[in-house]
Amino acid sequence: MKPRAHHTDSSSIKSISSEDVSTQQHYHGNMCCSAEAKNPAFKRGRQLQQMQMIILPFIPILALIVQTSYEMIEIVSYRMEVTEIENQVTMATDLGKVVTRLQQERSDVAFYIYTNGMTLRRNLNDTFLETDLALDNMSSWPDISIRTIQPNNGEVTWLNMSEFRETLQEFRANISTEDSTVPQILRWYTTANAALLEHLTNQIKDANKSGVWRFLLSFKNLLRSIESLDISSVYGINYYGRGYLKPDSYIKYVQHDILGRDLLNGSLHFVPSLKVIYRNITLTMRSYGNITQWSKTIQKNLRREGNVADARSYYESMAYYIDELRKLQRALRSIIRNEVQKVLQSADNMETFGIAILVVVLIVSPIIIILVRNAAATIQLYAINLAHKAKELKREKRKSDSLLFQMLPPTVATQLKQAQTVPAEYYSAVTIFFSDIVGFTEIAAECTPLEVVSFLNAIYRMFDERIECYDVYKIETIGDSYMVASGLPVKNGNKHVAEIATMALDLLDASGYFSIPHKANEPVQIRCGIHTGPVVAGIVGTKMPRYCLFGDTVNTASRMESTGEALKIHISAEMNEALVKVGGFKTEHRGLIDVKGKGLMDTYWLTCKEGATPNNSHGEVAWFADMKPVYLKIV
């Protein structure tokens, strides 16, 4: 007989509801490699995931380090720029002091020449000494171009510090009341100051990106204002001393006087705090009103008698006024130094803060990486444990599924696993088989419990192996009673009659291989009963669900077994009629018997299949030698 089509091998049973993280272990080739790379259950997968978890936070950390480093570079660059600005401011202030001393020197020398050495505001040697001291205090000297005062007017000469001082000393040595004139003196000092002021202007342009450019520009304008006012005062001395200015001298006076006042206003505009100081100067200076009046008189350029006393008064007043402007210049230098210190302090703070941020980032970054690595390792360890638990759960699930499929029909078990309701079902034609061991009560009483269990286990193992060859379903075993049905839960038409009949003959023949445990020469005797008819089948119970059959057919089949004889298959008249229709089986009429609960029933004996002879030779079979129960082996 062919094995039944719906038989399911328990080794291939799988739970359709369980999920296993290691399922991808069954894939091969490229899919296997891909699964290993993604599955934390594999070493390669753990390494890849750990690398991903480390790289993921490392990207923003690296970006933060790069950003912080870039900002730190900018801060250091800004600090260097501020330091350079400080040097430029220092040079500008030192250069301004030199220009101031040259302006004072020009005024004193011009007045000395104009008065033929008769009148001095102060000793020229003291004036020269102050200029030399200002030159000595220069931290650095720029290469400047000065137009010579030789007849070839317009020639440009580049002078360093020593060359400039030699030229200055040579010019001073040549000053005399007879050979020198006021225009010559004015021209030389004005040319030198113009060169220095030009360089000062360039210095301010280099520092125009800093926060002190307004103050430097105000400082430059104030220097140029003093330069212009000082030049205009020389022409004013000439006017009051001689009573008249030539047109070219008059034009230069007006130019320098207006330019000086405009530059002064511009300087005060760039630094509003200087306005208060300048206002105090004009209020406290007694001769400020006279200076304004004298300036208006000179601008009219009316002819008058030359007066040395007026020239001296004008000179002293202008010198005093210019000295007051130089005090304003010193106050501005102090403001510039304070602003530079503020900028330097701000740059230092930014640099310190940037270094602190960079250090914190460099310290925290590896800590974060280590923490992430530890977290990844912990997660991977948890994943490994989870994979092991999942495997164990799957094994246990397979065991439970296998047990479920042994306890219930495969179709019914599948419906239960899918959480579906399994309703009771009516079957119009089912064949039921019962068997038991003759004299089992006496056998159990005379044997040890282990021998009884081993004995039943061996017989039922053999029965279970044999019925696998037929389209039948084992309903249950109770003690020595063995119940099998065909035609359910999957209907098979009229095949159930022949399947049960053939199986019964096979089991009856196979039982002869066994002997009673304590009576080795006495074979085991079984009796069988078969009946066919309608039944109702369904799942009964929730804690231990069982597939049960209900109906008179079950009761009748049981009565056929209980009223039968040893080593015979007792069948009902309905079963005999079904076999006749099917054909291929031999039966013997037993006659009418009294069946409990049924009364008189006409029954038959199933002897064999047509064309077959009974096999009474029962030799030893090797695979029945192991009589130890399976559950004891597992334990």
Image: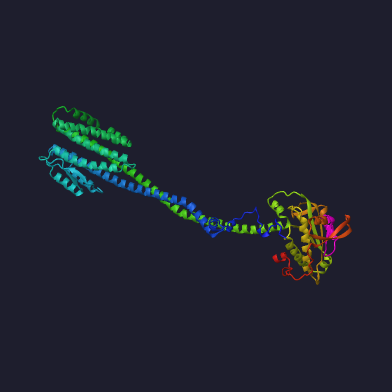
Horizontal side of 393 relative to 330 (left or right) equals right
Residue 570 is a magenta residue: yes
- Near-viewer residue (482 or 603): 603
Task: Please identify the quarter of the rendering in which residue 245 is found.
Answer: top left
**Looking at the picture, how far across and down is residue 495, in whole percent?**
76, 55
Instruction: State the count of labels.
Output: 0
* Residues in magenta, as a range: 554-574
**Looking at the picture, how far across and down is residue 316, in whole percent?**
20, 36
Task: Please identify the quarter of the rendering in which residue 601 is found.
Answer: bottom right
Horizontal side of 369 relative to 610 (left or right) equals left
- Near-viewer residue (18 or 345): 18
Note whether 299 is above or below 499 in the view shown. Answer: above
Task: Please identify the quarter of the rendering in which residue 574 is found.
Answer: bottom right
Note whether 589 is above or below 169 in the view shown. Answer: below
Q: Is residue 259 visible?
A: yes
- Near-viewer residue (340 or 10): 10
Residue plotted at (21% across, 32% down): 255
Report the quarter where the N terminus lies: bottom right
Residue plotted at (29% across, 41% down): 216
Report the quarter where the C terminus lies: bottom right
Residue 169 is a magenta residue: no
Q: Residue furthest bottom?
A: 521
Please say which color scheme the image uses.
rainbow
Q: Residue furthest front?
A: 611
**Looking at the picture, how far across and down is residue 570, in whole percent?**
83, 60
**Looking at the picture, how far across and down is residue 432, in whole percent?**
79, 56
Q: Is residue 239 visible?
A: no
